[in-house]
Image: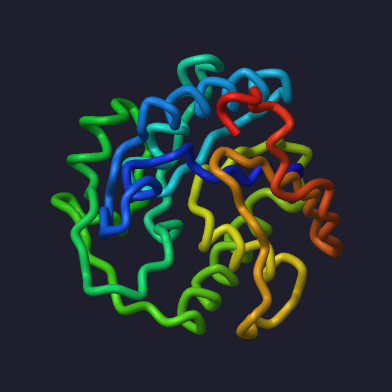
Amino acid sequence: MILYLVRHGQSEGNIVTYDVPDGRLTPLGRQQAEETARRLAEEGLDLLISSPLRRALETALATQARTGLPLEVWQRLWEYRDLEPAQFLGRRGVLELCPGALCDDDLPQDGFECGWETPETAFARARDMFDRIRRRFGATDQKVAIFAHGTFNAFLLMAMMGRPWQPGLWIEQRNCCINRIHIDPQHVRILGINDVAHLSTSTI
């Protein structure tokens, strides 16, 4: 498979100094999402997958609108959160925003709460997500785009590279960057990280 791992566009939480747990895209973020959708529409994708957080869903919706592809929502792609617990969309809220999306069976109907996560537990979650991706798609030639978050994407990339999490090691993820990874049952090849070449100068 080829995985296109995408960070969401600029969100309300990216432009303020206080906590916005489930912010929407800003006008700039929506423009970034549209430019990213144009790029991804050229890649011959087969499926879109998103975190249940609004900023990721709104970014994924731009690509779905351009491609008409099915959208799945995986709860455990939520962003790493080491602050107090906050409430996020459940199945009902996701389907209001994304009619027709296929939600994980374990996504609660009326929302879920997460917070006080440690780097160790986030990295373990990333390993679980990589295992899920590889089991389902690793032996296929499918092209799949996953829309998630800067910090969690970094954990996921480290898990794919087989690197243990350690303080001070980080992978930059700009808004609406695309990471391309070839995954098969035995190998992982990183084809590109933090690519924003598809964004116009005014939106980087």
Task: Give how far across and how far down residue 11 sits, in percent.
Answer: 38, 41
Instruction: Please give the name of the residue rendered at 36% of the width and 35% of the height, measured from the top-left corner.
Output: 25
Question: What number of labels is visible?
Answer: 0
Task: Give how far across and how far down residue 152 sits, in percent.
Answer: 52, 62
In terms of image quadrants, where is residue 185? bottom right
Instruction: Please give the name of the residue rendered at 43% of the width and 26% of the height, measured from the top-left corner.
Output: 30
The answer to whether 87 appears left or right of 69 in the picture is left
Q: Quadrant of the N terminus?
A: top right
In terms of image quadrants, where is residue 108? bottom left
Q: Quadrant of the C terminus?
A: top right
The answer to whether 55 appears left or right of 143 in the picture is left
* Rendered image coloring scheme: rainbow
Instruction: Please give the name of the residue rendered at 65% of the width and 25% of the height, measured from the top-left corner.
Output: 201
The answer to whether 50 appears left or right of 113 in the picture is right
Task: Give how far across and how far down residue 130 sits, in percent.
Answer: 62, 63
In terms of image quadrants, where is residue 126? bottom right
Q: Where 18 sits versus 140, above or below? A: below
Q: Where 72 sits versus 43, above or below? A: below
Task: Give how far across and how far down residue 6 sits, in percent.
Answer: 59, 43
Question: Residue extending furthest left?
Answer: 110
Q: Where 130 sits versus 38, above or below? A: below
Instruction: Please give the name of the residue rendered at 52% of the width and 28% of the height, measured from the top-left corner.
Output: 32
Towards the viewer: 83 or 2: 83
The answer to whether 111 appears left or right of 200 in the picture is left
